[in-house]
Image (cartoon, rainbow, N blue to C red):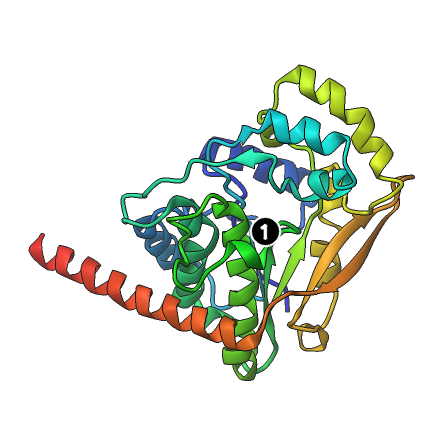
Amino acid sequence: MRKVVLITGASRNMSKAEAVRTSLLASHPAAEVSIVQVDVSSLPSVFQATKELKQRFQRLDYVYLNAGIMPNPQLNIKALFRGLFSRNVIHMFSTAEGLLTQNDKLTPDGLQEVFETNVFGHFILIQELESLLCHSESPSQLIWTSSRNAKKSNFSLEDVQHSKGQEPYSSSKYAIDLLSVALNRNFNQQGLYSSVVCPGTMLTSLTYGILPPFVWMLIMPIIWLLRFFANAFTLTPHNGTEALVWLFHQKPESLNPLVKYLSATTGFGSNYVTSKKMDLDEDTAEKFYQQLLKLEKQIRVTIQKTNNQN
């Protein structure tokens, strides 16, 4: 039986998505590639996309949940130069902790943008697709793109949307780690498994847009040098997908739900996968999961009221 794989975060632009589809079919003519438009920062878009998916497919075997929005990131120049000459230079570049400030905002759904895009939109996606994901004859797998920047200190159960904090990206990635653990606890018996990965420090068109060109000219030699001392600097999307591809070939039930799988690259460019136990506990994960269920219920009631009024 052919596997059905859903990948989010490919593109919100349908013309670009069509170009990618054409390229994939050119290199893999036997493949079947479909496109469904979805904006996970918009719940109406998520509901429409899941409706289309349930019409097209009878099952899903793998779901790659890729969302890493960091709205309007601004470089902290002082932190950059202070970090360049400190013992924390490797940590700074591999996690971007303290380097970037973000301006979060509310979405039309009334949720914090980073939280809805990176966490809640995907949570609703999974809830809506449960019938396609939970099948006893063979397991299905969720693979979340997390980060080395997922910090326990930046997350709070009292403010899961991080509306009062300064690190919404880090908070959302830690929330993803918690959610993955909770999903395993609640769905493994139904054949659904969840894992989290980190692609490492990748340089993409989005990354290059954060800093002025002269800054990249300054720091790129340093980054290439740091590759010999830390494996987090994957640098290219090809290298960064190492852990994501590796997970595709593993039996989901054999994976440790409390471990994050990391793409790694040596100083000479060889790729491999390593793992690290996540800094969390299952009790906090379950409490967070219950908060998401409560928020989902509130959202559905609001949507129903709106529909009735219309």
Provide residue 239's location: percent of width, then percent of height: 77, 43
Left or right of residue 241: residue 12? left
Q: Is residue 60 visible?
A: no
Q: Report the residue that reaches farthest toward the right.
A: 268
Q: Residues within 10 Å of mark 1 (few under 14, many from 20)?
A: few
- Residue at (37% x, 49% y) in the render: 163
Q: Compare residues 118 and 216 and report the one nearer the observer.
A: 216
Q: Position of residue 249 (x, y in %)?
A: 74, 64
Q: Position of residue 166 (x, y in %)?
A: 47, 43
Say above or below: 215 vs 115: above
Single out the residue that lies furthest toward the top.
214
Which residue is the site of mark 1? 32
Question: In the rendering, at what x and y percent does residue 77 appear?
Answer: 61, 25
- Image quadrant of residue 83? top right
| Element on which disc 1 rests | loop
Please give the count of numbered marks on the rendered protein. Answer: 1
Name the residue rendered at 57%, 48% in the picture: 33
User: Which residue reaches farthest left?
Assistant: 309
Name the residue at 47% across, 69% down.
Answer: 132
Residue 176 shows up from this direction: yes
What residue type is disc 1 on?
Answer: Glu
Residue at x 73% of width, y 44% of height: 91
Specify the quadrant of the image occupied by residue 84. top right
Using the image as rendered, state which of residue 296 and residue 237 is in the foreground: 296
For the N terminus, the image quarter is bottom right
Q: Is residue 217 above or below residue 175?
A: above
Return the residue nearer the eye: 237 or 120. 120
Kindly indicate the quadrant of the structure image that contains residue 257.
bottom right
Horizontal relation, residue 99 to residue 287: left or right: right
